[in-house]
């Protein structure tokens, strides 16, 4: 069974640009969530999608957005990049039923550097 | 503000030592507690999902206990090996907020041969 796949793995952007990150979940998983990891901050929840609907959003500015497609693949977009957006962005999928949160299966992450 | 705290922040042990670390979480509206292991250059991997007070789970040399009334969980590693070197994260699913998890800062374990 293929794991969670994130692309691209590494990218460098400049301030003001925008970026789109992609995540393909494990087959059969309908929940996809996104986390940001910066040094000293730990994993911070960005948002979660379930069956193409955003179920919850973390405390991030509107520049951070996402979507989920009918095949459960998800993308997240960051517009007007700032230096502080440099981070590792992790995607995770899970097999959720109802409101229960099963274990998360993480991708290897997309490391974004903003210059 | 919901907070998940882990201690210690880092731990350096010798091969063969047994070790344990703590995760503290809100005791209200509890329904699960997750433990993950995150090795360098890899993705975080689930160790345990614990749901019942008094739960004790085991995977090889690693075990975890759960006290939901007082809001803490312990992770134990018996006879640490260099391959146990990783950051261990606990995470608290927020009640009634979809799949949102609050992660602790992690405990970074280094096991020297």
Image: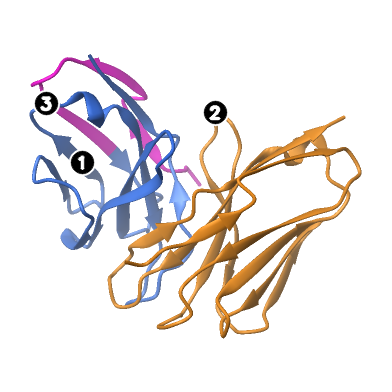
Chain colours: A blue, B orange
Report which residue position mark 1 lands on.
A75
Q: Chain of mark 3?
A: A
A89 left or right of B40? left
Near mark 1 (Cα within 10 A), the count class, few <14, some 14-19 or many ≥20, is many
Separation of residues labelled 3 and 2 (CA atoms): 26 Å
Report which residue position mark 2 lands on.
B41
Does the magenta-highlighted stretch encompass residue A5? Answer: yes
Q: Quadrant of residue A97?
A: bottom left
The reply to whether callout 1 and callout 2 are in contact (CB within 8 Å) is: no
Residue A49 position (above or below residue B27): above
Does the magenta-highlighted stretch encompass residue B70? Answer: no
Q: Using the image, tell me which numbered label, if any, was put on residue A115.
A: none
Disc number lying in front (1 or 3): 3
Residue at the image point whose x is 41% and y is 63% from the top: B3
B36 left or right of A41? right
Residue B31: horizontal and vertical position, in percent? 46, 80
**In the depicted view, which residue is nearer to us: A31 or A33?**
A33
Residue A105 position (above or below residue A63): below
Q: Which residues are magenta?
A: A1-22
Discs 1, 3: same chain: yes
Residue at the image point whose x is 43% and y is 83% from the top: B28
Q: Chain of mark 2?
A: B
Separation of residues labelled 1 and 3 (CA atoms): 13 Å
Chain-order first, disc 1 or disc 3: 3
Q: Quadrant of the C terminus of chain B?
A: top right
Report which residue position mark 3 lands on.
A18
């Amino acid at each position: 069974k293929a794991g969670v796949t994130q692309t691209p793995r590494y990218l460098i952007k400049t301030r003001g640009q925008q970026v789109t990150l992609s995540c393909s979940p494990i087959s059969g998983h309908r929940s996809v969530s996104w986390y940001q990891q910066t040094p000293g901050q730990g994993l911070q929840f960005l948002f979660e999608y379930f069956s193409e609907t955003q179920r919850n959003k973390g405390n991030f500015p509107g520049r951070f957005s996402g979507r989920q497609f009918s095949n459960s693949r998800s993308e997240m977009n960051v517009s007007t990049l700032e230096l502080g957006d440099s981070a590792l962005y992790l995607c995770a999928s899970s097999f959720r039923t109802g409101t229960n949160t099963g274990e998360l299966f993480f991708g290897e992450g997309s490391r974004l550097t903003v210059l | 503000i919901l907070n998940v705290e882990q201690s210690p922040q880092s731990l350096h042990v010798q091969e063969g030592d047994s070790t344990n670390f703590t995760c503290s979480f809100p005791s209200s509206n509890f329904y699960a507690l997750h433990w993950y292991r995150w090795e360098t250059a890899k993705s975080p991997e689930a160790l345990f999902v614990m749901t019942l007070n008094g739960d004790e789970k085991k995977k090889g040399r690693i075990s975890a206990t759960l006290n939901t009334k007082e809001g803490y969980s312990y992770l134990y590693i018996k006879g640490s090996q260099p391959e146990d070197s990783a950051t261990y994260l606990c995470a608290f699913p927020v009640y009634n907020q979809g799949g949102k998890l609050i992660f602790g800062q992690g405990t970074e374990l280094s096991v020297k041969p």
